Amino acid sequence: MPEAASLSAAVETLADRFRSMPQSRLLGAVPGHPSRAAAALALARRLAAVAQTAEAVAGGGNGPVGPPREFPDAGAFAAGDQLAVAGHDLAAALAALPESARVPLPEPLGGPATAEAVLARALAEVAATAALCG
């Protein structure tokens, strides 16, 4: 799926914003999160969980085996890097799938969807977090 590169670009742009934020901004509260860093970590965790499922589908499985592995809270200054890793992992997993491939996401992550829909959701979440933390 060539469009997956757009996710990498969007995530890298947002990650760079977090990497360059001063501590006072990183720790500043935003609606729904105790800090901008917490909002970035929440997004990274969602993207990572979706990536794990997409990677399993790309590998010929029906989804991840066992519970998803979750990013630890490595502190405010790691939020940008964690976001970049999760976003790039998801983009790579989606790039390995045809657009019509079904990704069996659990309901908390949006439910089953095509790879194309998963990409659209991920891009929307990145844009929403960018607007929230702007």
Image: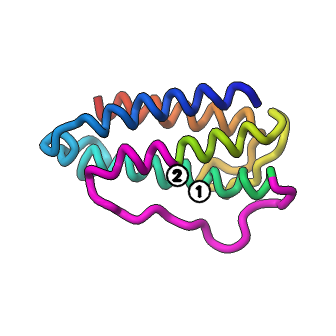
Residue 103: x, y in percent?
76, 49
Magenta residues, dominant SS class: loop
Residue 126: x, y in percent?
47, 34
**Residue 81 colored in magenta in the image:** yes
Q: Quadrant of residue 52?
A: bottom right
Residue at 73% of width from left, 70% of height from top? 65
Asked if disc 1 and disc 2 are in contact, CB closer than 8 Å, the reply is yes
Callout 1 crowding tier (Cα within 10 Å): few <14, some 14–19, many ≥20: many
Q: Which mark is residue 38?
A: none
The quadrant of the rendering that contains the C terminus is top left
> Judging from the image, what secondary structure is the residue with disc 2 in?
helix
> How far is disc 1 from disc 2 in space, using C-alphas?
5 Å
The residue under label 2 is which amino acid type? Arg
The residue lying toward the viewer, choosing from 12 and 48, is: 12
Residue labelled with disc 2? 46
Q: Which residues are magenta?
A: 59-85
Q: Quadrant of residue 1?
A: top right
Tally of numbered discs: 2
**Up-down: is 14 above or below 102?**
above
Q: Quadrant of residue 30?
A: top left
**Up-down: is 10 above or below 49?**
above
Q: Which mark is residue 49?
A: 1
The residue under label 1 is which amino acid type? Ala
In this image, 64 relative to 9: left or right?
right
Residue reaching furthest to the bottom:
66
The residue lying toward the viewer, choosing from 53 and 111, is: 53
**Up-down: is 36 above or below 120?**
below
The residue lying toward the viewer, choosing from 59 and 25, is: 59
The residue lying toward the viewer, choosing from 118 and 2, is: 2
